[in-house]
Amino acid sequence: MKKIMLIFVAMCLSLSAFGQEVDMKTLWERGNHLYSASDWNGAVATYDSIVNAGWESAPLYYNLGSACFKAGKKGEAILNYYRAQRLAPADGDIAYNLAYAESFVKDKIEAVPEFILSRWKVSISRLMSANAWGVVSLLLLGVMLVAAAFYLLALRRSIRKTGFVVALVATVGLLLSLVFGGEARANLLRDNQAIVLSTAAAVKASPEKTGKDLFILHEGTKVEVLDTFGEWSEIRIADGNEGWIRSTSIEII
C-alpha cells in the first residue's frame, strides 16, 4: 500500500511539473506575441511572471531585457542583459545589446586598469559557458590518459615519443581549461554585482540618511556590493570609489 502511495505521489508531482512547463510555454509565447505587437509593458509583465515562477534562461532574460529597453526601463534592461550574459557568456547578440544599452547610462566611470593577465583570463573564460569548459576539461583528460598509456605501453619509440608530446600538450590544455572553467563558474555564481535601478541615488559616507553625500549614481550603473547594514548597501564603483547606497536603489545581477 505504501509503495502504491509513493508511486501515486510521484505521478502527481510529474503531472504538476508537466503542467507548469506547459503554462510557462504559454506565457513565453504570449510574451513573444506582445513584444511583436509592440506592447512593451505587457511583454515585460509576462516575461517577469515567468522569472518570478522560478524559471530562468539566457533567451528569457534577453527578451526581458529587450522589452525593458523598449519600454524605457534602461536600468532593468541592463540588469537582465547581464543576467542573460551570465548564462550565455559567448552570445554575441547579448553582448551587443548590453553594450548598446550601457551607452545610454549617464555615469561615465573610468574603470581602474586591470592586470593584463586578469583581463585575458576573464575574456577567454567568456568564450564558453562553465558547462562547456567542463566538457572540454573532460575531453582533454581523456586525451591525456590515452596518450600517457601509449607513452608507457607502446613498444615503438616513435609512438612513445608522440604519446609523450600529446600527453604534455593535453595536460597543459587541461590545466588552462580548469582555470578558465573556474573563472566561468565563479562568474555564474557571483552574487555581489548589482545595477542601479533608481533614476538617481545618492551614495553616502555612512549608512544613514544624514550621512554626507559623496556622489550621485544614475540608472543603469553597475556596482559591486561589499557589505550590507540594515537598509543600506556598501558599494564600490569601477573607478574604486566606495560609499553607502539604499539597498532599494539597486538589484543584484
Image (cartoon, rainbow, N blue to C red):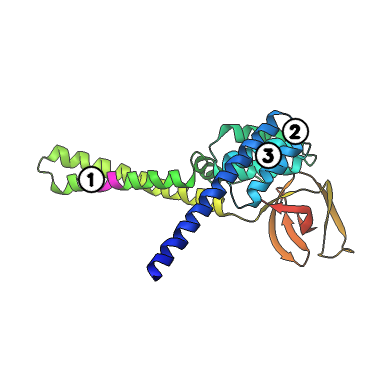
Looking at the rendered structure, the kind of residue marked 2 is Asp
User: In which quadrant of the rendered view does residue 85 lie?
Assistant: top right
Residue 230: image x %, image y %?
77, 67
Q: Is residue 1 placed above or below 93 in the rendered structure?
A: below
Q: Is residue 68 visible?
A: no
Q: Which residue is mark 2?
A: 39
Task: Looking at the picture, tell me which residue is in the foreground, 132 or 24.
Answer: 24
The residues colored magenta run 142-148
Q: Which residue is mark 1?
A: 146
Q: As drawn, is 197 to the left or to the right of 92? A: right
Task: Looking at the picture, tell me which residue is in the foreground, 161 or 179.
Answer: 179
Q: Residue furthest front?
A: 1
Is 145 part of what is drawn in magenta? yes
Q: As drawn, is 216 to the left or to the right of 137? A: right
Q: CA distance from mark 1 to mark 3?
A: 46 Å
- Is disc 1 surrounded by few (<14), some (14 to 19) or many (20+) residues within 10 Å? some
